[in-house]
Image (cartoon, rainbow, N blue to C red):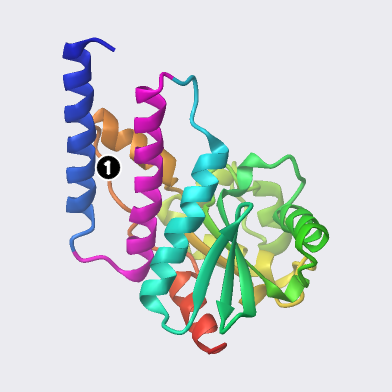
Amino acid sequence: MGTEKEGQWDQSVADAYSRLECLIREPTTEADLFSRLIRVYLEEEEVRIRQKLKRKSSQRISRVMHERVGEFLSGQLSGLSFQVIDGLLFIKREEQLVGALKCIPDLGSYDTPSWNATLARFTKQYQKRFNLAPEKLLFVICSLAKSLDAAHAKELTGIDVWCGAALTTPAYRDALQMYVSKCVEVMDALPQPVHQVYFLSADVHPNALACQLLRGEKASLPDRWLRPSVGDLIQFLQGRL
């Protein structure tokens, strides 16, 4: 990278962080965590450019993402300790395992037929690797970008849309929340899915927003968060103290 281009890149990065700060002046709990996840992608793009890599490292993103989620939760919950092992955040109280959290950027990246199948795959994987009981697993899904199936939405709720992405438009906000709630209710991958699966944004992906910030494009945090969300997760963990 030439000196002039390096200077332009440095300015783009500085502007991106500055604009992100402007977006989160009075953050909610969800906005606070979401902004931390955006930073993970901004930092990874810095690494990619500096090291002249072709693409971002998904393994590094996963590790750092779980570290940041642990830092976030430790600021919200006293009496718990957090440790990242192989893409999973272990949550303990006085060395006693409270739960293990998997942060999933979006559900559209997995070659599985449904959300339930994706979580079932993770549950089986972590049972085998860590001898982890399914009831100890917690999931935070950052975005539903590329994760919505119009046919499945109609099957569960009767909502009829031309494509899954339409569910993220303002006109279908309540319908989308109904669909998300129904999806969680019928999951059999986990013993108590209503207490084990949490969501953030319907349509905004932290990686996509990071790219918008770096390009100087108009960007904004989600103005509504899906439920159950991070605030509900914190309440659930508080109940374990």
| Residue situated furthest front in the rendering | 95
| Residue bounds of the magenta highlight | 26-52
Q: What residue sits 40% from the left and 54% below the top?
A: 170
| Front position in the image: 83 or 181 | 83
In the shown orientation, is residue 118 left or right of residue 103? right
Q: What residue sits 83% from the left and 59% below the top?
A: 128
Estimate the x, y position of residue 221 in percent, counting from the top left.
31, 52
Q: Compared with residue 241, is residue 64 higher up or lower down, i.e. above or below?
A: above
Magenta highlight on residue 39: yes
Our reading of the magenta stretch's main secondary structure is helix
| Front position in the image: 129 or 187 | 129
Q: Quadrant of the N terminus?
A: top left
Amino acid marked by disc 1: Ala
| Callout 1 crowding tier (Cα within 10 Å): few <14, some 14–19, many ≥20 | some
| Residue situated furthest top in the rendering | 2
In the shown orientation, is residue 93 left or right of residue 78? right
Estimate the x, y position of residue 87 in percent, counting from the top left.
61, 52
In the shown orientation, is residue 193 left or right of residue 35? right
| Front position in the image: 34 or 42 | 42
Magenta highlight on residue 127: no
In the shown orientation, is residue 17 left or right of residue 155? left
- Badge 1 marks a residue whose secondary structure is loop
Q: Which residue is mark 1?
A: 219
Q: Is residue 175 visible?
A: no
Q: Is residue 112 visible?
A: yes
Q: Compared with residue 187, is residue 21 higher up or lower down, i.e. above or below?
A: above
| Front position in the image: 172 or 212 | 212
